[in-house]
Each structure stands twice: as structure tokens, then as C-alpha cells.
């Protein structure tokens, strides 16, 4: 559970900050992604050949994180750094059962875009 909290905190820091705070967040995200990358080596899914509980728990990385990085325009999940994790994401998202459970990408994009505008506006109020 601790790593999940760390991952969300690091992702928040990487996506909604600038400068050194953002860099620190990116490093933390990549450090945690390296753990997942190493767990996937030689496997299609975390448990082997089929989707299991860990895959479901990590599903936010495959879908939500991809949308979020498009909104904030930073690269969190890089195929060169994390080839196994990226391949896992593609395989996971290509499963019909998974597709049926995901929200529409455009709605999630709009949600994160609104969040970005709100955070940007609140920062400008603090600094003015």
C-alpha cells in the first residue's frame, strides 16, 4: 500500500509542479516504475499469461497515466525506459473485458484538463 501512495504522490508532484519539484516527482515516479518494470520481465502480465489482481490494481498506469501525461505534456511512461511496462499496458488495454470497464478517454482527458486549469488558476492567485 505504501508504494501505491508513494506513486500517486510522486505522480501529483511530477504533473502539477514545475522546475525542481517536477523533476523530483519524475525521478520518484521512474524509480517506482522501475520496480514494476523488473517484475514484468519475461511475463505478459504481472501474474503470468493472464490478468490478475496486480494487473487490475496497476490498471491506472496503463490508462489513466497515459491520458494524464497527454494533458500535462510530460512523458511519465517512456517506452525506451520501460519497454515491458509499456507492452503490458498495451496488452492489458487490448483485453475486451478491460475495455468495457474503462471510462471514455475523451471524458477522462476533459476531466484532467479541467483539473489542470483549476490548479494553474489557483497557483496564479497565490503568486499574484
Image (cartoon, rainbow, N blue to C red):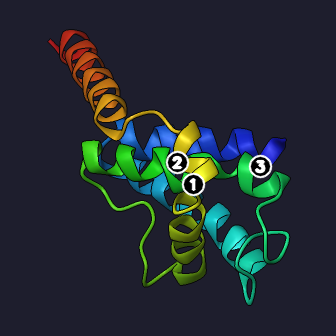
Distance (Cα) linking label 1 and label 3: 28 Å
State the residue in front, 104 or 24.
104
| Secondary structure at numbered mark 2 | helix
State the residue in front, 92 or 125.
92
Residue placed at 54% from the left, 77% from the top? 87
Q: Which residue is mark 1?
A: 96
Mark 3 vs mark 2: which is more N-terminal? 3
Q: Marks 3 and 1: in contact by CB < 8 Å? A: no
Q: Marks 1 and 2: in contact by CB < 8 Å? A: yes
Residue placed at 49% from the left, 50% from the top? 63
Mark 1 vs mark 3: which is more N-terminal? 3
- Left or right: residue 123 compared with residue 42: left
Using the image, tell me which numbered label, if any, was put on residue 60.
none
Q: Marks 2 and 3: in contact by CB < 8 Å? A: no
Q: Which residue is mark 3?
A: 3
User: In the picture, residue 88 is in which quadrant?
Assistant: bottom right
- Where residue 4 sits: x, y (%)? 73, 44
For residue 109, above or below residue 18: above
| Secondary structure at numbered mark 3 | helix
- Left or right: residue 121 compared with residue 34: left
- Left or right: residue 31 compared with residue 90: right
Amino acid at each position: 500500500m505504501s508504494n501505491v501512495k508513494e506513486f500517486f504522490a510522486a505522480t501529483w508532484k511530477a504533473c502539477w509542479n514545475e522546475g525542481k519539484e517536477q523533476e523530483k516527482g519524475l525521478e520518484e515516479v521512474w524509480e517506482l516504475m522501475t520496480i514494476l518494470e523488473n517484475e514484468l520481465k519475461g511475463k505478459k502480465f504481472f501474474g503470468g499469461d493472464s490478468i490478475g489482481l496486480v494487473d487490475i490494481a496497476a490498471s491506472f498506469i496503463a490508462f489513466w497515466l497515459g491520458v494524464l501525461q497527454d494533458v500535462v505534456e510530460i512523458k511519465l511512461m517512456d517506452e525506451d525506459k520501460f519497454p515491458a511496462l509499456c507492452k503490458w499496458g498495451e496488452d492489458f488495454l487490448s483485453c475486451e473485458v478491460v475495455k468495457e470497464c474503462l471510462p471514455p478517454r475523451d471524458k477522462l482527458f476533459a476531466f484532467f484538463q479541467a483539473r489542470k486549469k483549476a490548479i494553474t488558476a489557483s497557483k496564479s492567485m497565490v503568486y499574484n
